[in-house]
Amino acid sequence: MTELTRIECADWFLDRDRFVILTHRKPDGDTLGSAAGLCRGLRLLGKTAHVLENPEVTPLFAPLMEGLCKPEPEEGDLLVAVDVAADTMFPRAWDALKNSIDLRIDHHGSGREYTPVELVESDSASCAEIIWEVLLEMGLEPDEKCAEAIYVGVSTDTGCFRFANTNAHTFDVAGDCAAAGADIFDWNRRLFDTNSLEKLRLQGWVAEHTKLFCDGTLAICALPRSVEKALNVDEDDLGNLSSFIRTIEGVCMAALLRETDSENNTKVSVRAIPGYNAAAVCEVFGGGGHAGAAGCSVRLSMEEAITAVEKAMLDWVNS
């Protein structure tokens, strides 16, 4: 595996054509914003580029993908993964592509190598920031749509610039996006200032069913599929729910557990403040991420997963 610099990554793109960009399953604003921004930027530079159609894109982020997607790669396409820390994070329908991915661009320092070349900057708050700098190295003059996609990636992965990963460069990129014509107000309203009634009801349920332990510094909430159905919530409503738990006063690290479609398989999302390590907890189960935000899947029933994750959190605190 060869590690690239931003300039080397820019040259990699300039020397090639026909790109298909891959995102991770249950795609969030950073993987989709990075993919859309890269795709639009490459097209502005005269390249042929598409985003591989991800069936799990939610209505909130669907506008980013308009006119960019193709259903499957064709012979001769180069595959580029963005914001995907490990090949286990792709939708299962893409399993056949795992050994054919040409380049990974990411900001997860705990990620696993799975491409022949990669650009990974773990000090970047978002993958979208890296994409932006690579596109500028290529000589891009961004348009409004490209800038909006990058802004979505930057703003969502920093919690609208509230999370500890936010730094001066984050604001510089956001400012560049605004200068390029991105509609910052509209995206901020959609992403951070609009809640469905179902989401508010869900937050009420979570507040009542969250367990605090370790003197109130740790929190865990198990959300059964039956409750999701009863409250009629969708994936957009469920976004950032683990961060919502972490906002409880005194809580330093919080875990949200959700049942998946597979029997005895539970998805875990962990969020933490500086000084606590969400990634270390998730790595126990083969997952990863950042110190402040990480995730994994555990092949256990919900009850078994609650016990296992609680123990992993306590083990980290006591280590």
Image (spheres, rainbow, N blue to C red):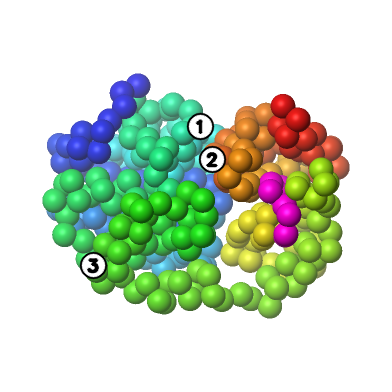
Q: Which residue is mark 2?
A: 290
Q: Position of residue 256 (x, y in %)?
A: 71, 50
Tell me which numbered mark, 1 or 2, is placed earlier along the sequence.
Answer: 1
Q: Disc 2 versus disc 3: distance between alpha carbons? A: 30 Å
Residue wearing tag 1 = 110
Label 2 sits on a secondary structure element that is: loop
**How many angstroms separate mark 1 from mark 3 (CA)?**
33 Å
Quarter of the image for the N terminus: give it: top left
Looking at the image, which residue is at 84% across and 38% down? Answer: 307
Residue at the top extreme of this rendering: 1
The amino acid type found where label 1 is placed reads Ser
Q: Which numbered disc covers residue 180?
A: 3
- Which residue shows up at 26% across the image and 62% down it? 176
The verdict on residue 108 being magenta is no
Magenta highlight range: 248-260
Residue nearest the viewer, comparing 10 with 73? 10
Q: CA distance from mark 1 to mark 2?
A: 7 Å
Residue 259 lies in magenta, yes or no? yes
